Image (tube, grey):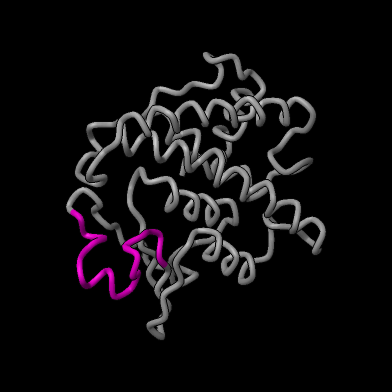
Amino acid sequence: MKLYVSPRAPNPRRVQMFLAEKGIDLAAAGIELVNVDLNAQEHKSAAFRAKSPLARIPALEFDDGRVLTETRAICTWIEGQHPEPNLMGVDATERAFIEMADRRIEWYFLLPIANCVRHTHPGLAPLEQPQFPDFGRSQGEKLRETAAWLDAELQRQPWMAGERFTIADITAFCAIEFAKLMRFNAGEQGFSALQAWRDRVAQRPAARA
């Protein structure tokens, strides 16, 4: 199998951190990492679009030629193949609540961060044409609204989805690390619980992998 990723991009990092939290040896699992150069527009080449028609990464190519895209779908497959340690829920109820937390973070935290960075950072201009700086700045404001909500959640529970570390924490951590490109620092902006959570996750081996 081949897992197509790209350094510094948050969604591929989510999958790689998920694999690391599982303690999966990529060679033993038969997974080869393939770096895609986004700045060189490799993801928009005809060869890559044949694998991922929407030109998105990550993408997991199976040995039979099928390609699985979308971060959550890839992590679902990994969880099925390597159920322990559990990161997505042990029963239907827990799975639903973890997915709710993960989706909220993906849509209302990661997406505004990505939009802000893509539309305001000069280094992302080749990937986002045209850039709309006003839209990017407005997305930055939405990020702060969600950060305030997450900070309140973390004042009453230790992790994003409740009492234990899950995929929702991986999504949130990769998002907040990507937010460094927009100079967002939770602690400096008064979100002390969110900053303390971020610092705890940063100490995990998978966060440093």
**116 lies above or below 60:** above
Q: Is residue 89 above or below residue 61?
A: above
User: Where 115 sits versus 103, above or below?
Assistant: above
In this rendering, the count of numbered labels is 0
The quadrant of the picture occupied by the N terminus is bottom left
* Residue found 49% across the figure and 26% down from its top: 141
Residue at x-position 63% and y-position 18%? 192
Q: Is 51 on the left-hand or right-hand side of 193? A: left
Picture residue at 54% right of the left edge, 38% below the top: 109
Q: Is residue 42 highlighted in magenta?
A: yes
- Quarter where residue 133 is shown: top left
Stretch in magenta: 41-59
Q: Position of residue 78 (x, y in %)?
A: 57, 66
| Place of residue 5 in the rendered image (x, y in percent of width and height, measured from the top left) | 36, 57
Q: Is residue 145 left or right of residue 9?
A: right
Residue 130 position, x and y percent, is 23, 43
On the image, the x and y values in percent for residue 87 come to: 67, 54
27 relative to 207 in the view: left or right: left
In the picture, residue 128 is in which quadrant?
top left
At x 42%, y 53%, the residue is 12
| Residue 45 shown in magenta | yes
25 to the left or right of 114: right
Q: Residue furthest left?
A: 40
